[in-house]
Image: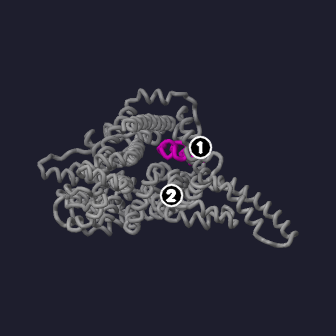
Amino acid sequence: MAVLTSATPKEEAPGEGDGKRRTRTRGKAGRHLYAGWFTYVVLGFFTVGSLFPLVWTAIAASRDNARLAETPPPFWFGGNLGSNLQAAWTDANMGKALINTVFVAGTVTVSTVLFATLAGFAFAKLRFRGSNILLLLVIGTMMVPPQLSVVPLFMAVAELEWTNQLQAVILPMMASAFGVFFMRQYLINALPTELIEAARVDGAHSLRLVWHVVFPAARPAMAVLGMLTFVLAWNEFFWPMIALTQDNPTVQVALTGLGRGYIPDQSVIMAGSLLGTLPLLIVFAVFGKQIVGGIMQGAVKG
Amino acid sequence: MTSQDMRSAPATSAAGAGTSPPGPDGADEREKRRAARRSKWYQRDAKWSPYAFISPFFLFFAAFGLFPLLYTGWASLHRVSLHSPTEMEWVGLHNFTRLLQDEYFWNSLSNTFVIGIISTVPQLLMALGLAHLLNYKLRGSMFFRVAMLTPYATSVAAATLVFAMLYGRDFGMINWGLGLFGIDNIDWEGGSWTSQFAVATIVIWRWTGYNTLIYLAAMQSVPNDLYESAALDGASRWQQFLHVTVPSLRPTILFTVVISTIGSTQLFGEPLLFGGSPSGGASNQYQTLGLYLYEQGWTNFHLGRASAIAWMMFLVLIVIGLVYFLVAKRLQKSH
């Protein structure tokens, strides 16, 4: 064993550039192996596949309808991006949709993270009567499809005359069972019980404890949960489509207006799509690393 | 186990407060009384604060998660019209018996199954393979990870709209590409298998990267010496993957299978926007359960029927869940 591990670095160093898959080098554990050219080719192929539809959205948005009805389809950008964006902006209510969606996703994110951190802390570190049953309830309902609550929500919204109002979309999304579970899993390990005890000995009551001990310890997970929630809330589709109309849409609702032939111009549809996706793509470009880390972290602990 | 310490915490804090000030006797007495009061306060705090912490979540959860879930069951036993959703007429199990004789229901159920299988199975297999590749020492591994996760940031609507164009019959890029190999234009949306395949590819595109990351995370926590001893036994890379990686990942694989199953049971946005109507194609060839629910409720105004479909969906999930549970048990026993 010792011989093997000490031999590893010497062998690995030159192996990087040579084009062979090094299947025959024995005595190495999986993640110490360098990738061969084959790995790069496959990963490159999937990277292109992942990005291509998005790039092509932009290409189609920069053309006009006539060009999109020709073969071969366009592979490079044209000059109509500005006018198409403008058309999507005015005809499909995209400006209002973007503002609405920022507001909805922002509110949902703040409240979800706050509620989930408080509840997650209680489930992770405090003992109270009924905690097990309540936690089981949370986990159980994570599995229930949203379709199961749509009819009563619709009835309530109709009764309250909230149709087409943003609170109809915001309120049902404010509590996330996944969020509670996520924070609990994180805080179990990240928040040492001795730290809570020490704070208690110093005479801190619960609110101080949360503010000075729990929130600082939970901050990384709160950031990750916040980003995941924001993405989900931004892309939420089923319920907003039922509760809102094209007069006061979120981005996703406005996009259905485009797709249904509200405006039959394909390049304008793609421009609307681009407008609705771009904000998240920018978030991804900036925080991609953290989001990737967050998903992986959540996966191991969940 | 940790919470046991929490209970004793107030007691120790009170003791600390009581003994620390070494003042004169009278002051000490007063100090003790205050400490006792404080300790009572702390006990109350420790006892009730957990409920305060969980209450904001549970308030919303009960109002917008739990209550609607149960009320859907109640509504499914009534005739409810979209136009006057407050007027409910009791019909017993009529909505359910009607559903069982409804060919559109069975059609949408089988479509949901087919699309679910042809989207989940390849997606998870590809994700497993990609995670394995990403687990190598790699240049730009973070770039690959972020790039493969970008479809996850793309909304169902944006993704479906662009795929609907790529799958276009006359001018779509996919038919153009196939044309290079001499294949005639395919009417993807019109055909039954072709449309289900197309819808499945949208799901695959959006979720493969996400599942890849989950597998990758699990692979990175597989202990290294498992690989080392396998290598000592002369196992090749492929054998290591098959006999070390996959068995270690079994809980994670089960987790992703369950999540994907739930996701594909409620599939809605992709088939809705692929053809632009809740009928799911001219002959309902890709109408899913979610889409049928929406059509019954919001195109045909039958909210009671929609509720019944929602509960059938739930039942289907429970049955599948039980099957998974039994399979997982079996697998555990056999190893």
Which region is colored magenta? A137-159
Q: Is residue A211 left or right of residue B140?
A: right
Residue lying at the far right in this picture: please name it.
B26
Q: Would you place residue A156 above or below residue A254 in this image?
A: above
For residue B108, say whether it is visible. no
**Pointer 1 residue:** A133
Estimate the x, y position of residue A41 in percent, counting from the top left: 21, 59
Q: Quadrant of residue A82?
A: bottom left
Q: Which residue is mark 2?
A: A186
B229 or A64, which is in the foreground? B229
The percent coordinates of residue B201 (x first, y second) are: 29, 48
Q: Quadrant of residue A57?
A: bottom left
What is the residue that sits farthest to the bottom in this orientation? B23
The location of residue A136, given as percent across then percent down, is: 55, 44
Q: How is the image coloured?
A: one colour
Q: Residue at x 47, y 44 (%)?
A: A145
Q: Could you tell whether A125 is left or right of B226 in the image?
A: right
Tag count in the figure?
A: 2
Magenta stretch contains residue A154: yes
Q: Amino acid at mark 1?
A: Ile
Q: Secondary structure at mark 2?
A: helix
Chain bearing tag 2 is A
Q: CA distance from mark 1 to mark 2?
A: 20 Å
